[in-house]
Each structure stands twice: as C-alpha cells, then as structure tokens.
Amino acid sequence: MAEANGHYSYYPGCSLRTSAHSYGASSLKVAEALGLYFEEIDDWNCCGATEYVSLDALPAYSLIARNLSLAAQQHTGQLVAPCSACFLNLRKVDKIMKQHPATNRRINRALGAGGLSYKPGSLKVRHLLDIMVEDVGMDAIAAKVTRPLRGLRVAAYYGCLIVRPENGYNPEYPTELDTLLQTLGATCVDFPLKAHCCGGHMTQISEDTAYEMIRRILQNAADYQADAIVTLCPMCQLNLDAYQTQVNHLFGTDFHVPILYFTQLMGLAFGMSEREMEIGSELVSAREALSKIGTEVEISKPRKRDK
C-alpha cells in the first residue's frame, strides 16, 4: 500500500466536477472500496489546462503551483490527479520549480501574495492509474472482483498525456491499464493507437484535422472488434464520445463505440451498480456492450453535459 497508509491529497480538477462527473464519482467509490482515503484539496483552482501556459507561462505556473502549495499543507506527501492534463501540469510545474531556481523564486513570489509558498519536491504527483497499479496492486484488485467482466472486449486507451517521457509509462505501447482490465476479467484487444493523441482542443481550431484524429482511433478499435474504448483522461473521453456523430457524418462511417472510464469498469467488476458508476452519462450508449458481461444492466438516465 501507499507510504501514507492509503492517505492521499486529491485534486479532482474542473472536468471531474462537470463533463467528467462520472469519472470523479466512480474514482471516489472505487478508492473507498479499496481502502484508500482521498483528501480533497481545500479551495483548489483550475490547473489552466493547456491554453493558459501558451499565453503566459509564469502566471500559468503560479496558478498550478498554488494547488501544490495547498496540497503540501495536508502533509500526505502524495497528490493524486485522475485527469491526465491536471496530472501532467502539476508534475511538470513541480519539476520546473526544482530544476530552475530563478523560476522557482518568481513563482514563490507570486504565491507569497496569497500567503502561500511551495518547496519543490514536497509532493509526489501521481496519476490515479499509478495508484491502482503500484500501491493497490493486481492481487488486491482481483480480490474485490465479484462480477468479472467476462465476454467484454475492450480497447485500453491511454492518450498522449500520461505517457509523456519521465512519467513512467512506455510512450508507444503501455500495458498497465491493459493488465488492470484483464484482472477485472475483460479481454483487451490489440490496440496500436492506444497512446496516440485524440486531438485535444483541436476540435475548436481545425475540425477536419480533429475529426480525422478521432476517426483513426475509433477505426482502430473497431478493426480489432472492441466493444468499448476504456480511457483515463476526460479530454479523450469527451472527444471520442461527443464527436462520433460528426465523424460518422463527415467520413460516412457508422461508429457506435461507447467510451468509458476505467474506474467505471472497476466499480462494475466490484459489484457496484451501473447507476452508482453513472453509466448512461456518456453520449454513445454502453447498453449493448455491457450486456455481454452477462448481467442485467440498469443504465442510469442520461445526464445533460455541462457546457
């Protein structure tokens, strides 16, 4: 288990409170079932995603460092972020402050205006998948499985953020999520594009480019007969789920591939209800896919996406 006896500082980020609410809810329920305690950072703020950093680095880094400072006050030593963009930003700023003393001083000067400071290296920033794989472990996860996901073929999709160099994952063909899903009883298909970019916010810049990037990922999963794509990133889930209709219209395809979070499948395998896991909040229905695990699937009423 974790160094802090299963106690972590927890940064949900904006998406897990809005468009990725199902990810946040399922993450907390699964963590509780595994004996993990996630202490949410009090008064956390947005990590700035990607755009803010491109506009002005120092305010962006200071915005992110504020969360690090608040988390450090909880004295857990570890900070977990389920969102891949949040994870990358928090980890990157901690590293930048550690390696660049001048930037560290400027960021801490900005934090000081709010009565805060941060000593780089005070926290170990980790993605939720890492907590499940390294701290909980497959044996403990397998012991919680009461409803194996037998018969469900899934494509494990990591996206491009979590596999950046120095994050500890194979940047071209990671396998950690595959192993976890197999432990739940699912069949993981070969998925060569598992670490390719979903396009991020490209849908707001060049739709044709974005839709082609999304099409390739959906096509790859379909080619290997996946019943669903399972991801760990809110942006990936949003792009692959919300834009399937546009992709089908543009390319003349007929994709109906549900995009689920790995924590939702963990919860189902642990015997939790589909309603608890907020299955049904996705736009592409998972009803047909989940019927293959041999249970009567109670799909919750679709929830309107927050704008």
Image (cartoon, grey):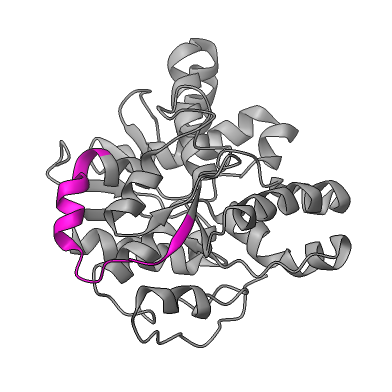
For the C terminus, the image quarter is: bottom right
Q: Where is residue 89 in the image (x, y as percent from the top left)?
A: 52, 36
Q: Where is residue 235 in the image (x, y as percent from the top left)?
A: 60, 53
Task: Please tell me whether residue 222 is drawn above or below residue 49 in the rendered image.
Answer: below
Q: Position of residue 38 (x, y in %)?
A: 26, 54
Residue 147 in the figure: left or right of residue 47:
left
Q: Which of 125 and 223 is in front in this view?
A: 223
Which quadrant would residue 77 be assigned to in this image?
A: top left
Q: Position of residue 244 (x, y in %)?
A: 72, 65
Can the viewer see residue 83?
Answer: yes
Can the viewer see residue 43?
Answer: no
* Residue visible at 34% across and 23% down in the picture: 121
For the N terminus, the image quarter is: top left
The stretch of residues the image draws in magenta is: 134-154
Give the number of callouts: 0
* Residue visible at 57% across and 66% down in the picture: 19
Residue 136 in the figure: left or right of residue 93:
left
* Residue visible at 62% across and 28% down in the picture: 58
Residue 16 in the figure: left or right of residue 57:
left
Say whether residue 219 is magenta: no
